[in-house]
Amino acid sequence: MKAIVVTDQAAGTAGMKLAERPQPEPAGNDVLVEVHASGFTPGELSWPSSWTDRLDRDRTPSIPGHELAGVVSALGYGTAGLSVGQRVFGLTDWTRDGTLAEYAAV
């Protein structure tokens, strides 16, 4: 899938580039969303969670953006209350890849 990725914190938005990335797999209680609209604020690139996960491990290249609207395309194991084809909007976890991509796991 195509996604906008960042690899260099010092470069700011100038370091953002379009790249091919693997499509995410929905984990337990996740949904995979085909992203139709995404939000991004340049300030995200200064947040530690844009660059490291909860265990402080480097997670570059990362996909910024955390707001999304789209359609559920797959369900993770145990996901309840949503269905494939359902229109959704929401926020992603700050320490996971974001929504400036064709698909996002939420």
Image: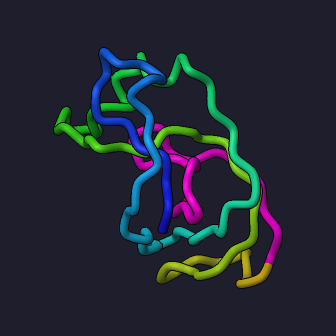
The scheme the figure's colours follow is rainbow
Q: Nearer the viewer, residue 29 or 69?
A: 69
Image: 31 above or below 4: below
Q: Is residue 106 left or right of residue 83?
A: left
The image quarter containing residue 57 is: top left
Residue at 29% across / 35% down in the picture? 7
Q: Which residues are magenta?
A: 86-105
Q: Nearer the viewer, residue 28 or 65?
A: 65
The image quarter containing residue 19 is: bottom left
Percent from the top left, x then y, of residue 16?
44, 34
Q: Is residue 33 left or right of residue 3?
A: right
Quadrant placement of the C terminus: bottom right
Q: Main secondary structure of the magenta part?
A: loop
Percent from the top left, x then y, of residue 82?
73, 76
Whether residue 93 appears in magenta in the rendering, the answer is yes
What is the number of callouts on the image?
A: 0
Whether residue 99 appears in magenta in the rendering, the answer is yes
Q: Nearer the viewer, residue 77 or 5?
A: 5
Residue at 58% across / 50% down in the picture? 99
Image: 76 above or below 16: below
Image: 33 above or below 85: above
Residue at 48% across / 68% down in the picture? 1
Percent from the top left, x then y, of residue 12?
42, 19
Percent from the top left, x then y, of residue 2?
50, 61
